[in-house]
Image (cartoon, helix red, strand yellow):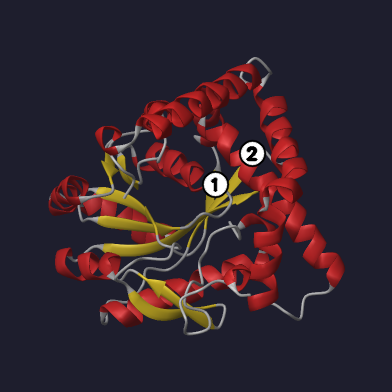
Amino acid sequence: MPAEKSELSRGALRKYYVTGLFLKGVIGAMRLLPYERRIAAMGAIVRSLAPVVGITKRVRRNLELTCPELPEAEMQRICRAVPDNAGRAIMEHFSPEGFTKRQSTAKISGPGIAAFDAAVAEGRPVMMITAHFGHYLAARIALQARSGKPIGCLYRRMANPYFNDAYVEAFYKTGAPMFEQGRRGMVEMVRSLKKGGIIAIVSDLHAHGGEELTFFGKPAVTSILNAELAIKFKAELIPCYAIRQPNGIDFEIVLHDPVPHTDPKTMTQFTNDDLEAMVRQHMGQWFWIHRRWKAWNGLGVQPEDMP
């Protein structure tokens, strides 16, 4: 968990303060542009910076680890597409008014729609399992519009305390409630499930204390808590993805069939496999920048950490 402001040194606080001012300035300047132009512009900026700040290196090494068969031309395409999507998602996050207006009418498809609608109508809890793919907040917005009910969202506090307030404020403008990762947030999320609420959770990060399952054929430590909660509260566990469309602005929201309730590890591996299948169809839309395979060689290190 990120440190509290009171736990940081003066030097760290000074660094975060300056960085926060800079980021707010960049985002504020970009917001002066019309919605579609600012989204595309931020994608281009992050794409151009990717080779300089190490994003391209991280994406390439993750791809070399998991998909060594990829042709070089495809590898290069993905290395450009990933930071472009990330930049667009950043600007969409900080353009909540335009983003909400645009995605409220996003197309929703997939075999999981019937299960989602039935659970909502019956007041049963629903857990939308998503990932850092396309932009998951588009799914939250579209499904809130469809169901007429709020969708709670679990988030992780940013390390920079001066920028975190703006980050969380933008989150709230796409809906509430919000649950901050940690003990209090978990209690609030469980309370929501008990009341038959809908929550959205990203499940594609390395999870300390999780189970060593597989993702793209490699060991990937994954939290099984989502499956445990689904079993305990008899919640529908529905894989959900927001696929960015060719125009770079719109999304199609795809709901897959609910995950069968068996045991937590089997259910979580099911969601890993489901996400992998979706990523393979849209390789440039998943956040290949993450350190997802920390235990890839049994030593707990990523390829870039090797001598």
Neighbour tally class for label 1: few under 14, some 14-19, many 20 plus, Cα within 10 Å? many
Is residue 247 shown to the viewer in this render? no
Amino acid at circle 1? His
Residue 229 found in image quarter: bottom left
Above or below: residue 64 compared with residue 177 = below
Is residue 100 shown to the viewer in this render? yes
Q: Position of residue 181 (x, y in %)?
A: 28, 48
The disc, 1 or 2, on the residue closer to the chain's N-terminal end is 2
Q: Residue at x 67, y 61 (%)?
A: 59
Q: Residue at x 35, y 61 (%)?
A: 115
Residue situated in front as seen by the camera: 144 or 75: 75
Q: Position of residue 246 (x, y in %)?
A: 74, 47
Picture disc at residue 145: none
Amino acid at circle 2? Arg
Residue 38 found in image quarter: top right
Which residue is tagged 2? 88
Residue situated in front as seen by the camera: 186 or 173: 186
The residue sitting at the right extreme is 73
Q: Is residue 81 left or right of residue 242?
A: right
**Marks 2 and 1: in contact by CB < 8 Å?**
yes
Q: Residue at x 58, y 24 (%)?
A: 27
Above or below: residue 59 compared with residue 120 = below
Which residue is tagged 1? 135
The residue sitting at the top extreme is 32
Spatial distance from mark 1 to mark 2, Cα to Cα?
9 Å
Above or below: residue 92 compared with residue 279 = above
